[in-house]
Image (tube, grey):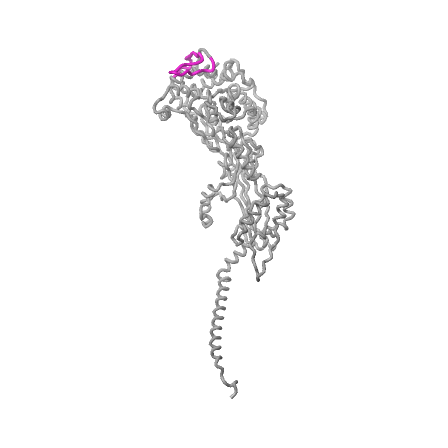
């Protein structure tokens, strides 16, 4: 029998193995089919979305911040186009990414576009080394979620237009380079009204953490909207101070987005084929912020700036006595908000802040409302009203002024020897001795009650910057501070605006406006209306009354007559500096600061800080008041000599502007010598 006919012993073993191999192959094939079913049927939509997102990039469209205009339509704050250069590290420098291999050979990468970009931007060697290090640090890993791909690096801010044009021209050579258009806040009048307008800044991490807490990205859209209604994100610009901060929700607007197609090198693709890849909606237009119309008069602000030019520091407030609307808020020294709003880069912002906070004159402090100062003799009208209340003091009673008065062991001095004076002459000539005797008869708490009823010693509620409440002390306040050891001298100082009495220029202006209009204390307003970009009024804010001060009209008349004499009587303290063409009433003040020089200070600075504060608070026209003007020249010296000329220039410019706008000649002033006061009596 041949070998071919004899069964081989290993055939059965092969068949057994074959069955196992067939079973393993079948199982593997089924696994592959299951995986394909999972990828295509079950997870197909998810992977399709991922693939779609790899070529579709949602670009954020910045919104335009609302414009701020003055009462006459002049633009005080707007936005200008700025262009920043950003890079995607993994695309601009492929050589910085880890090397990957295929079939044992390194995968060829695209050439770096970074050297060409550095050349166009004219980066110096130090800048190039710094950005090289940042790019390489970002690309330690190049997985899908690595900063190498998802964290752009800002290279240049606010680049010139010619550089933008060059970057656009070489766009195909600059993979991973984006020129991002960003609106930057712009203040055409620079430092004019800087404290009132404020400035914008990048949102700080603490504020951002409040609206974007941990796990924010996992929240539903409704929850995100509830936590972060204004849609803040890292790097956003927000109002930091002034109107920019207080009216942020109106000015901010709402950003939009646009879907764009990108290729493997991160370059944007356009055309019908690219548009077909974008699923609708392809774009959400941004909503611009609302515009604000202020009650402020920019021309009047410029006139104030000119009048205050000889003086180093101070504040001016101009208010319409008929409505409480503010026509001017001026604080000096000031700053240029363009330097602080980030348009010229972070380095310039840091430099500006360092310079401003090193200035001993405190240019970052809004002295119209955040600074509280002793008012000096501008306090005397309120002491007089307290004395007239319930006829505590007879206005025709005379006191003899010999230049000083002695109370206990202390001598309280007057500026001059005034002789025999009545209340009206005491206000006009600013006789301290008369008011020392008046204070002794009236008492501190009565003076405090009247002053507080006119808004002194409490915040006005304007709300655009932190307000100091000032201080109108009472007997109980002194009892707490001095443990019951109250002294009559405290009341004497209070009556003439010295000692522990402090007010803000805004408070004083509103109080004098209430004297001028017959006792109506208004809520100060700086925003007149909210408007759309085309000028349509969305919301208008009518005048708001805080209270009607309970002062008899006869008492107010006596005080306004005396304030008229301050300027128009030859013996009045403001008479030498008056403008004969103007009809003005007011009160001068010279407030001691109590400053004690420090050894380490420069002699020139110490000499300046040791000077008194110069005040003049007034209203005009005296016989038919329209505006109240309060001037503080910080460390300026004498109120009559320093503050009054500034106020006269401001009132003159106000009347000139009104005459020009209304097309009428400037009104001639009522005769001043031996003239009747606003109350009608000589």
Residue sitting at x 55%, y 29%: 297
Residue sitting at x 53%, y 50%: 147
Q: Is residue 487 left or right of residue 40?
A: left
Q: Nearer the viewer, residue 57 or 548?
A: 57
Query: Residue 402 in magenta?
Result: yes
Q: Is residue 507 above or below residue 161?
A: above
Q: Nearer the viewer, residue 94 or 284?
A: 94
Q: Which residues are magenta?
A: 392-416
Query: Residue 448 in magenta?
Result: no
Q: Is residue 508 left or right of residue 164?
A: left
Which residue is farthest left?
Answer: 484
Could you tell me residue 311's position as x and y percent? 54, 24
Q: Exactly how many numbered labels are in the figure?
A: 0
The answer to which quarter of the image holds residue 123 is top right
Q: Nearer the viewer, residue 459 or 487?
A: 487
Could you tell me residue 327's position as x and y percent? 52, 28
Q: Is residue 187 above or below residue 145?
A: above
Mark yes or no: residue 523 visible.
Answer: yes
Q: Nearer the viewer, residue 651 or 475?
A: 475
Could you tell me residue 465's position as x and y percent? 48, 33
Mark yes or no: residue 617 visible.
Answer: no
Could you tell me residue 86's position as x and y percent? 57, 46
Which residue is farthest front?
Answer: 599
């Amino acid at each position: 029998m041949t070998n071919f006919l004899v069964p081989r012993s290993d055939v059965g073993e092969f068949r057994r193995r074959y069955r196992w191999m067939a079973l393993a192959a079948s199982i593997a094939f089924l696994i592959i089919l299951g995986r394909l079913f999972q990828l295509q049927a079950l997870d197909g939509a998810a992977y399709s979305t991922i693939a779609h997102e790899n070529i579709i990039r949602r670009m954020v469209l910045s919104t335009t911040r609302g414009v701020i205009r003055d009462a006459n339509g002049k633009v005080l704050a707007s936005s200008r186009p700025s262009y920043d250069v950003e890079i995607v590290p993994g695309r601009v420098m492929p050589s910085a990414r880890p090397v990957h291999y295929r079939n044992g050979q390194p995968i060829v990468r695209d050439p770096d576009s970074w050297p060409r970009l550095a050349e166009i931007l004219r980066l110096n060697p130090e800048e190039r080394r710094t950005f090289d290090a940042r790019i390489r640090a970002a690309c330690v890993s190049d997985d899908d979620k690595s900063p190498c791909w998802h964290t752009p690096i800002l290279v240049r801010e606010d680049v010139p237009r010619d550089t933008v044009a060059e970057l656009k021209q070489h766009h195909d050579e600059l993979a991973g380079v984006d020129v991002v258009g960003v609106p930057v806040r712009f203040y055409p009048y620079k430092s004019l009204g800087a404290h009132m307008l404020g400035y914008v800044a990048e949102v700080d991490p603490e504020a951002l953490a409040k609206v974007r807490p941990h796990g924010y990205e996992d929240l539903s859209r409704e929850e995100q909207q509830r936590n972060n209604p204004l849609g803040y994100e890292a790097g956003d610009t927000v109002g930091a101070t002034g109107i920019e901060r207080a009216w942020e929700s109106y000015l901010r607007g709402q950003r939009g987005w646009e879907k764009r197609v990108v290729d493997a090198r991160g370059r944007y693709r356009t055309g019908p084929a690219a548009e077909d890849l974008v699923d609708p909606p392809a774009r959400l237009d941004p909503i611009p912020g609302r515009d604000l119309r202020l009650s402020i008069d920019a021309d009047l602000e410029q006139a104030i700036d000119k009048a205050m030019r000889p003086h180093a520091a101070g504040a001016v407030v101009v208010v319409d006595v008929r409505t409480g609307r503010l026509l001017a808020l001026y604080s000096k020294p000031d700053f240029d908000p363009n330097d602080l709003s980030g348009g010229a880069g972070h380095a310039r912002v840091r430099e500006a802040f360092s310079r401003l906070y090193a200035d001993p004159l405190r240019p970052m402090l809004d002295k119209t409302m955040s600074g509280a100062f002793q008012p000096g003799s501008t306090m005397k009208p309120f002491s007089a009203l307290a004395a007239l209340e319930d006829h505590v003091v007879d206005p025709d009673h005379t006191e003899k002024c010999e230049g000083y008065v002695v109370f206990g062991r202390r001598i309280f001095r007057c500026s001059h020897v005034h002789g025999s004076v009545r209340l009206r002459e005491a206000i006009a000539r600013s006789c301290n001795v008369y008011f020392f005797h008046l204070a002794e008869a009236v008492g501190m708490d009565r003076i405090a009650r009247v002053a507080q009823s006119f808004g002194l010693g409490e915040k006005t509620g304007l709300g655009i910057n932190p307000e100091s409440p000032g201080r109108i002390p009472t007997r109980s306040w002194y009892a707490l501070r001095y443990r019951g050891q109250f002294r009559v001298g405290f009341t004497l100082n209070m009556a003439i605006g010295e000692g522990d009495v402090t007010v803000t220029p805004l408070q004083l202006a509103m109080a004098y406006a209430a004297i001028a209009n017959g006792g109506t204390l208004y809520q100060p307003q700086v925003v007149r209306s909210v408007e759309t970009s085309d000028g349509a009024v969305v919301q208008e804010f009518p005048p708001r009354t805080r209270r009607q001060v309970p002062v008899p009209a006869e008492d107010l008349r006596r005080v306004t007559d005396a304030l008229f004499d301050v300027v128009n009587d030859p013996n009045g303290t403001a008479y030498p500096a008056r403008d004969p063409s103007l009809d003005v009433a007011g009160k001068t003040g010279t407030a001691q600061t109590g400053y004690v020089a420090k050894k380490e200070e420069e002699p020139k600075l110490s000499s300046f800080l040791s000077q008194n504060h110069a005040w003049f608070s007034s209203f005009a026209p005296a016989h038919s008041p329209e505006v109240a003007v309060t001037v503080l020249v910080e460390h300026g010296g004498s109120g009559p000599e320093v503050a009054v000329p500034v106020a006269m220039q401001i009132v003159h410019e106000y009347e000139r502007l009104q005459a020009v706008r209304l097309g009428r000649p400037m009104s001639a002033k009522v005769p001043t010598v031996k003239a009747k006061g606003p109350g009608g009596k000589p």
